[in-house]
Image (cartoon, grey):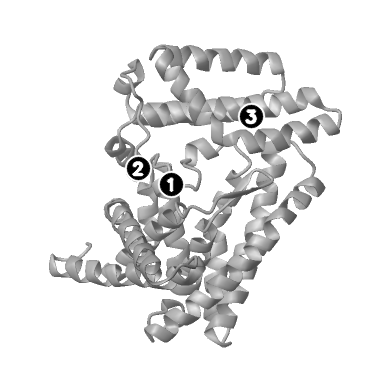
Amino acid sequence: MLTLTSPVETPFDRLPAGVKLAALVVATSAVFTITSPWILGGAAAVVVGLYLTGGPRLLAYGVRLLWPLWPFAAVIAAWHLWRGTPVFGLVVLLRMAVAVTVANLVTMTTRLDEMIAVITKMATPLGYFGLPPRRLALALALAIRFIPDLMQSAERLTLAWRARSARRSGHRLLAPLTLAAIDTADHVAEALRARGGAG
Amino acid sequence: MERNIAYIALFAALIAVLGFVPRIELAAGVPITAQSLGVMLCGTVLGARRGALAVLLFLALLAVGLPLLSGGANLWAVWGTPRIGFVIGFPFAAFVAGWVMERTSLAVGVSAFAGALIGGMAVLYAFGLVGMVWRMGITPGQALFNLGAFIPGDMVKAVIAGVVTASLARMRPGVLLSRA
């Protein structure tokens, strides 16, 4: 549920996560300054090439991940056709497609622990504002650990509701779910303190 | 300190879980889910500072690549889309919601509703508007018109944020760190 990993091994899996993230930020920023649909088309072709290093299966997977964007694409296309700026509309759509597919490629080929290491390292300057990196790492780990747990609480609450009522629960399960989060937080805080604190 | 970290982490997780609540309708290309309700609750329950930190932690989860945004996107995937404005606005929305909660002495439910309205709508829409203009190549006027599609859903969410915050205070007095 929580992972977005490539179905096949690619050459990018072995690149350091920091390099990939830096390349992603540079590439995305560059894409948003380009105004020529031809250059953007070229960029899109390059992205297709990058995906093909993992074979057609990876390319198909990458295209499938673009699907949730169709409502944006529809609005953008409709707006620019209506305004009589179809070329600019195409530019906007190509930028979005390139930015999203490159981002997904980086995510798919980078392990979660590598990514966390890079992000906590990037957050080192926050230490001067009273947030040491190890505290951020602890908070990240706790949140990741407790997402499935809260998910289970939500499912249990839903099941219990269905057993009691044929109507839809609507917002009525939100307060108990929030309370479950609060109770878990209290337990976790106690456990942390018992084990020597968060440092 | 331990208590702060645990609360911030659990509320970041709560925002993520609310993104999976299967009530995804589409308005002008941005899915409406309970996720922004989670952001509002961070502010109204945890208060300005802790609420904003919880949302920032959620953004850090997105930055490490977890596809926790409703619809299954992470920070990098959403970077090039019109939703980026809303995502960047999330921590500010929670901060303002919490600030309203802390600085007013109205009834809990009323204050939480007002905080959710000002933080989760006024502040968030300002960020969302910039994102849409930036990423869709449309005029601010058109972006403002698009925002209109969210108003009914977000009004409902603000009311729910008020109701949920009030019932938490009733079920467990002293649980609201925003009013501690």
Residue that sits furthest to the left in the current view: A195
Asked if badges 3 and 1 are on one and the same chain, I answer: no
**Depth check, front residue: B11 or B92:** B11
The image quadrant that residue A191 belongs to is bottom left
The residue sitting at 54% across, 71% down in the picture is: B161
Against A70, residue B39 (above or below) is: below
Q: Secondary structure at mark 2?
A: loop
First in sequence: mark 3 or mark 2? Answer: 2
Q: Residue B16 falls in which quadrant of the image?
A: bottom left
Q: Is residue A36 above or below residue B40?
A: above
Residue most toward the front? Answer: A166
The quarter of the image holding the N terminus of chain A is top left
| Amino acid, disc 1 | Leu
Residue named by callout 3:
A32
Name the front one of labels 3 and 1.
1
Q: Residues within 10 Å of mark 2 (few under 14, many from 20)?
A: few
Which of B163 and A185 lies nearest the eye of the viewer? B163
Q: Nearer the viewer, mark 3 or mark 2?
A: 2
Q: Amino acid at mark 2?
A: Leu
Per the model, the C-alpha gap separating discs 3 and 1 is 25 Å
Residue holding disc 2: A2
